[in-house]
Structure formats: structure tokens, C-alpha cells
Amino acid sequence: MVLVIGSMCWTYNMGELLGEGGFGAVYAGVRAHDGLPVAIKFARKMEGMEYLYVPGLPELVPLEIGLTLMANKGPSSPNIIDLLDWQDFPDHYIMVLQRPSPCLSVFKLLESCGNIFEERFARYVMR
């Protein structure tokens, strides 16, 4: 898969499906030039979807992209996943995100706990 962002062109090798939901799907991937593990998210745009103005960008962007860009502007934190690349299309958008290892979605974590979190554990996870 080739993503073209502005004048840059990065190639990602897309792998297995990591998860799928109502808005799209997330795949494992690797950035070809350096082997960096990534997650490639394809999200459908739904009617009534929210958009956000991000200073420095010429147009409004989907809320998820905008919030992730804004979270990435501050000091680097191991608790915030890096947005490496993104593209916006009329009916969907693509986000290429850092994929730390080991990594587990909140859904999979909840599933592994029998779908119940104790409040203390939930506070720890959400901090």
C-alpha cells in the first residue's frame, strides 16, 4: 500500500486484520523503509460525523484525526500513540499509527477480564 501525503510518499506493507468494528478496520503493518511496526486504520465516514479545525491545516479534518494530531503536538508521552501518516478521502479516511509491542486493545483487555473491570483497575487503565 502506498500512502501519498503532500509531496512525501511512504510505503507500508499491510498484514493481518487486528480488529473490525462499525466504522472500519485496523490492520497490522510495517513501514517498508525501516521495519517500524504500524497499525493501519481504515474508517468509513458516517452521516453526521464531527470535524475539527486544526491550526496549520487548510481544511477541517475528521474529529479522530484532529484530536490525535493535537495530542501528538505536546511533549512525547509513552501513553499517547503517535500518528505517523494520514489521508482523508470523501467517504473514508486512513490513519497510520505507531503499534507498540506488546499491545492490547481496551476491548480485548475487557474481554480477557470476563467483561468486568474492578473500579481500581479501570482507573489504572484509563490514567
Image (cartoon, rainbow, N blue to C red):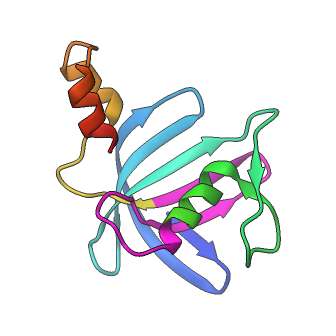
Q: Quadrant of residue 13?
A: bottom left
Horizontal side of 103 relative to 126 (left or right) equals: left
Horizontal side of 120 relative to 105 (left or right) equals: left
Tell me the residue at 37%/40% (across/down). Answer: 17
Horizontal side of 35 relative to 56 (left or right) equals: left
Q: Nearer the viewer, residue 7 or 14?
A: 7
Q: Nearer the viewer, residue 53 or 127?
A: 127
Of the 4 image quadrants, the one containing the C terminus is top left
Residue 9 picture location, percent across and down: 55, 80
Residue 28 picture location, percent across and down: 34, 51
Q: Quadrant of residue 56?
A: bottom right
Residue 93 is a magenta residue: yes
Q: Nearer the viewer, residue 26 or 125?
A: 125
Q: Which residues are magenta?
A: 72-96
Q: Quadrant of residue 105?
A: top left
Q: Nearer the viewer, residue 35 or 53?
A: 53
Residue placed farthest to the bottom in the image? 7
Vertical arrangement, residue 106 with respect to residue 50, above or below: above
Residue 113 picture location, percent across and down: 19, 19
Tell me the residue at 72%/40% (across/down). Answer: 45
Tell me the residue at 26%/14% (across/down). Answer: 116
Tell me the residue at 61%/74% (across/down). Answer: 4
Residue 110 picture location, percent across and down: 28, 23
Count numbered badges in the picture: 0
Residue 56 is a magenta residue: no
